[in-house]
Image (tube, rainbow, N blue to C red):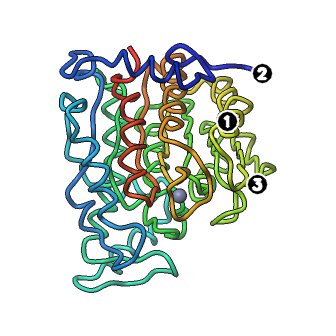
Amino acid sequence: MATVKCCGGTSAGRADERSRRGRRRPVGDTAARQTLVIYTHPACLAHDPGPGHPECPARLAAVLEALAAPEFAAVPRVEAPAVTRAQVARVHDPRLYDALERSSPTSGRVRLDADTVMSAGSWEAALHGAGAVCAAVDAVMAGPARRAFCAVRPPGHHATPQHPMGFCLLNNVAIGARHALVQHAIARVAIVDFDAHHGNGTQDAFIDEPRVLYASTHQWPLYPGTGAPDEHGAGNILNVPLAPGTRSAGFRRACEGSLLPAIDAFAPQLLLVSAGFDAHRLDPLANLDLDDEDFGWISSALVALAERHANGRLVSTLEGGYSLTALRHATTAHCRVLFGTACA
Ligand SMILES: [Zn+2]
C-alpha cells in the first residue's frame, strides 16, 4: 500500500497532531503571506434560499469568522471576479446559464427543484463562486501564490452539465478544472472531494475526460445516490464510499488504502479540492463521524501530494457543511494546513 507523508507522517496520531500544531508558524510569516490567498465575495452572502434552508448565508459567515482569526491575518483576501459565460460553457450547457440568468428573481424566490432555490442575490453569488475558483487557478499558476481557499457559496459539486441540483447552481470546481485545462494547458488535474455527499455533477462533467481524476470519499448510501465503487468513468473516477457512522480511523484507512495512492499515481499538475465539511460528526445532514482533526489530516496529505507533483499548487473551494460550529472548526483545521500555520 502506498503511503503519503504529510507533515511528518501518514496515520499521525493525536500526539503528532498536537506536536504539529505546536510548530505553527508565527502570524505574519513572510512565506505564508506570499504563498496563500483567500478568495471570497460579499455577493456570496446574499444568496438566500429562505428560512430554515440548511444552505444559509450564516454558513459563509461562520467560515469567514473562522478566517478572521489572528492566525490568518497575514493571508491576503481577494474579491472574486464573476465567471464569464464562456468559462461556464466549458462545463455547462449554455442553455443552463441562460435559464439561470432568466430565472433569477428581482424579489422573492424561485424554486428550481425540491432543494435548490434562487433568491434575488443568487445569480451574482453563483457567478462569483465559480469566478473565485477560476481566479484562484490563475493565481496559483502564475505564482507566487501556491495555495488558495475559496470561501464562497452556493456550493457546486451537485450541479451537472445540464441541471442545477442539490443546493448547487454552477459547478464551481468543475469550471475551475476546465479553466486550468484550457487556459493553462495543464495536462492532469486531480479533483479531491471529501464532502459527505457524492459530487455527481463533477463526476458527470469529467466522466470521459482522462486528463481529470475525480476522487471522492462520501457517505453511501446518501443523496444523490451516485458514487458506487464500480463507477469508473474512463478509468479516471475513483469513488470511495463510507458506511454511515464511519469515524476517524475508517476514514483515514479508506484514504490511505485507495484515495491518496490513486492521486499519487496520477501525479496531478494541479490539485483542486471540493472541501465540504458535512462529514463532521456534528453535521445534521449526514451520518459520518469525523472530527476537526480529520480535516486537518486529509488537508496535510493533499498539500503533501501537491508539493510532490504540482509544485505545491492547490485550490480548495467550500462545498457543504451545515453545522455552523463544525464549519468554523473544520475550516480552521483545513486552512491552518493550507496556510502553513499547522506544519512548519
Ligand atoms: Zn454535502
User: Across the whole image, how many numbered discs are drawn on residues?
Assistant: 3
1 vs 2, front mark: 1
Q: Residue at x 65, y 34 (%)?
A: 252
Cα separation, mark 3 vs mark 2, equals 22 Å
Residue 242 is situated, as x and y percent measured from the top left of the image, at 71, 49
Q: Which quadrant would the N terminus be assigned to in this image?
A: top right
Q: Is mark 2 within 8 Å of ligand 1?
A: no
Task: Provide the residue designation for mark 3.
Answer: 228
**N-terminal label among 1 and 2:** 2
Q: Secondary structure at mark 3?
A: loop
Cα separation, mark 1 vs mark 2, equals 16 Å
Q: Name the side, left or right, on which 106 lies relative to 55.
A: left
> In front here: 228 or 235?
228
- In the picture, the disc for residue 1 is 2
Cα separation, mark 3 vs mark 1, equals 21 Å
**N-terminal label among 3 and 2:** 2
Task: Provide the residue designation for mark 1.
Answer: 249
Residue 327 is situated, as x and y percent measured from the top left of the image, at 40, 51
Identified by mark 3, the residue type is Ala
Q: Residue at x 76, y 46 (%)?
A: 232
Identified by mark 2, the residue type is Met
3 vs 1, front mark: 1
